[in-house]
């Protein structure tokens, strides 16, 4: 388990809800760890869906700040990028990812944006019937331990980037508890 500073969050209730979901994830991880080895992979689906939903909430919050915090601004984002984003309506995970990629809001690594799109498709497999025929028809081959690890790494990369790059002013900090991620930190050289 490791902690990431939450002082970049714009909508405090979104931050509270992220913390709630991280607590849910902590319980799921503990249950996965305690489960017999043949049952442990069954926890992958709710864990992956929750991890990916937290990434979406982080991106939503960043775009919310860009669009609504016009007086405060957003540190480390150029004015022309702020204006370009404000001209668009971004309200779905795919458009958040595309907007972040276009303006390199999560860094220069295109692989991260591609991974986020892949995880978005996995997350959308919450629908058991798979009516849109997205990914494998067998969920056991979609919600895998490897996919869970990819979701963890993506969330870790996104949350560390927004935390280190887009901090808010001192007077707005301290309203949201810091984020505790329920796995061992992997990206220690980053940031």
Image (cartoon, rainbow, N blue to C red):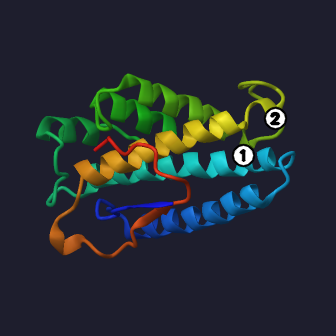
- Residue 30 lies, with reference to residue 117, above or below; the image says below
Label 1 vs label 2: CA separation?
9 Å
For disc 1, the neighbor class at 10 Å (few under 14, some 14 to 19, many from 20) is many
- Residue 19 lies, with reference to residue 116, above or below; the image says below
**Secondary element at image label 2:** helix
Residue 92 makes an appearance in the image = no
**Secondary element at image label 1:** helix
- Mark before the other along the chain sequence, 1 or 2: 1
State the residue in front, 116 or 43: 43
Q: Residue at x 48, y 39 (%)?
A: 154
At which x and y percent is residue 23? 58, 67
For disc 2, the neighbor class at 10 Å (few under 14, some 14 to 19, many from 20) is few
Number of marks: 2
Question: Which residue, given by chain and number where applicable, does mark 2 sit on?
Answer: 140
State the residue in front, 183 or 130: 183
Q: Residue at x 51, y 60 (%)?
A: 1
Question: Which residue, given by chain and number where applicable, does mark 1 sit on?
Answer: 44
Q: Quadrant of residue 118?
A: top right
> In the rendered view of the protein, which quadrant contains the C terminus?
top left
Disc marking residue 25: none
Relative to 15, 53 lies left or right: right
Q: Quadrant of residue 171?
A: bottom left
Relative to 76, 88 lies left or right: right
- Residue 152 lies, with reference to residue 33, above or below; the image says above
Relative to 119, 158 lies left or right: left
At which x and y percent is residue 82? 20, 42
At which x and y percent is residue 97? 43, 34
Residue 147 makes an appearance in the image = yes
Relative to 68, 14 lies left or right: right
- Residue 127 lies, with reference to residue 135, above or below; the image says below
Q: Residue at x 82, y 26 (%)?
A: 137
């Amino acid at each position: 388990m490791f902690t990431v500073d939450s002082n970049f969050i714009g909508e405090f209730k979104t931050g509270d809800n992220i913390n709630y979901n991280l607590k849910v994830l902590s319980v799921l991880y503990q249950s996965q760890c305690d489960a017999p080895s043949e049952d442990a992979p069954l926890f992958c689906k709710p864990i992956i869906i929750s991890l990916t939903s937290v990434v979406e909430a982080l991106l939503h919050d960043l775009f919310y700040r860009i669009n609504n915090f016009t007086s405060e601004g957003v540190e480390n984002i150029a004015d022309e990028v702020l204006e370009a984003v404000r001209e668009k309506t971004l309200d779905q995970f795919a458009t958040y990812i595309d907007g972040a990629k276009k303006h390199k809001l999560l860094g220069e690594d295109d692989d991260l944006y591609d991974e986020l799109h892949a995880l978005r498709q996995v997350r959308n497999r919450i629908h058991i019937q798979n009516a849109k025929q997205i990914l494998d028809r067998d969920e056991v081959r979609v919600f895998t331990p490897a996919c869970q690890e990819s979701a963890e790494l993506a969330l870790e990369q996104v949350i560390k980037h927004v935390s280190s790059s887009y901090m808010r002013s001192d007077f707005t900090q301290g309203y949201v508890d810091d984020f505790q991620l329920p796995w061992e930190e992997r990206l220690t050289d980053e940031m």
